[in-house]
Amino acid sequence: MGRRRRKPLPQEPVRATIESLAHDGKGITHSDGKVVFIPGTLPGEEILYKLTGRRRNFDSGEVVEVITPSPDRVEPPCPHFAGCGGCSLQQMEAGAQIQFKQQTLLDNFSRLGKVNPESLLPPLTGPVVGYRRKARLGVRYVPKKGGALVGFREKQSGYLTVMDSCMVLTPEVGEHIGDLRDLISEMDGCNKIAQIEVACDDHQTLLVFRNLEPLSEDDQARLDSFGREHKINIYLQPKGPETVAPLNPEQRTELSYRLDQFELEYHFLPTDFTQVNSTINQAMVPLAIELLDLKAEDEVLDLFCGLGNFTLPIATTAGHVVGVEGSEELVQRARDNAERNQIKNAEFFAVDLQDEETGGVWLNNRYNKVLLDPPRSGALEIVQKMRKIKPQRIVYVSCNPATLARDADELVNNQGYRLLSAGVMDMFPHTAHVESIALFEKSD
Ligand SMILES: C[S@@+](CC[C@H](N)C(=O)[O-])C[C@H]1O[C@@H](n2cnc3c(N)ncnc32)[C@H](O)[C@@H]1O
């Protein structure tokens, strides 16, 4: 039996008013009671759109014309914005993006957390272009599209976008996407590069090419001259992350960044987690420290501590700090960073914090303050353990307002904490990602 043919989608443009924005930044309208998501639109706008997809619970559309633009509409600064899925809010003025993210945070708190912050923190903002110093770029060799493609996936498909530049990436890489495409197109192993990882520190730019097969001598020479021409350190990754190594072994470099306010320097490896936006990180860490209201006698627990980004600054004021992190490698990096910075009152443990059975000596200590900075999935398992730890203050840094709100529900409605304040931090301008910080306190 043959496959059932899909009915072709109607092609005539439909007129609609955008009602609101979804959490991923797409405009929402309804047609015959069914929700339609239309990227690149803004609330209140009257538009013409064409259907691009039909699912059981929602449709997708593509804007054909904006008839009545929103006062928040601006010309998207990037020529690839319409197609590239890397950004979703470039059509929106920067201040309005912050308002949207703040509203998303508050909506999540009240809808999923049944809680409202007692006050709003002023947003932390920084540069809205050229801010991204960590990224994973897809690579694919597609001769019918003119050779290699390098970049992010398209908004409406899983295919890589045809792009020559990216304005949110650090310019040392973002201005050379076209050069990277030319480089890979010329390589003997043009279809053997799966992705390129971008890792920058305060001084240098590093690209890790994930090569699925060993590269020919000519390809190695091409990469070498590309690196020299553009002042980029080229690394290869033939297999898992432990195989990442410089193209030229004598060019092994240590990446590092500084937190000036605390006079701390961190060393890291290209595949380690580091905060993507250096300017926001420089402001976020002091804000978290201020909210913790640290005293010399404090015993602090830093959960999901990574390479010690918050732990070391905490240690400069608190009596003692324990950093807990799932990755053994990052825990080692945190210990090394503490030693390099002559910090002696910080200890680190490698533990899976999302395991309900989590335990260990570190959990038996007494802590009066806790900092949490979990991945998108949040920290419910360890937040439930706050009943036992009983910290007086908790500062929660979040990259997902839905899991923050869920965890806030546990802290406020089940454990009796107050949500004193919360605010957004513009870690990912032009995207719909919402980074935020929240302060919880318990008086008894
Ligand atoms: C958002 S990052 C924060 C890292 C660090 N606080 C910083 O500012 O650089 C989240 C961290 O959680 C760690 N992580 C993810 N899942 C974990 C788990 N199940 N248990 C413990 N740590 C985990 C990641 O390795 C990562 O370092």
Image: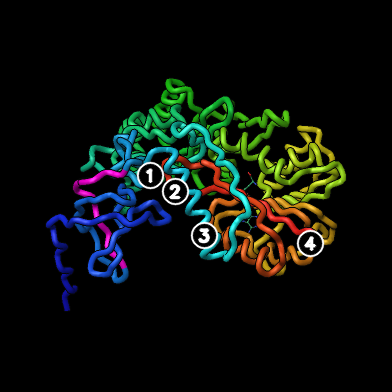
Label 2, label 3: how many angstroms apart (C-alpha)?
12 Å
Q: Nearer the viewer, mark 1 or mark 3?
A: 3
Q: Amino acid at mark 1?
A: Leu
Q: What residue is disc 1 on?
A: 89
Q: Which residue type carries mark 2?
A: Phe
Query: What kind of element bears circle 1?
Result: loop
Circle 3: element type = helix
Is residue 159 at all visible to an observer of this figure?
Answer: no
Report which residue position mark 4 lands on: 390
Q: Residue at x 71, y 69 (%)?
A: 357
> As displayed, is residue 443 above or below residue 256?
below
- Residue 413, image x and y in percent? 65, 68
Q: Are marks 2 and 3 in contact (CB under 8 Å)?
A: no
Tag nearer the camera, 3 or 4: 3
Question: Where residue 34 appears, x then y in whole percent?
Answer: 28, 68
Q: Kindly report which numbered mark, 2 or 1, lies closer to the viewer in this rendering.
A: 2
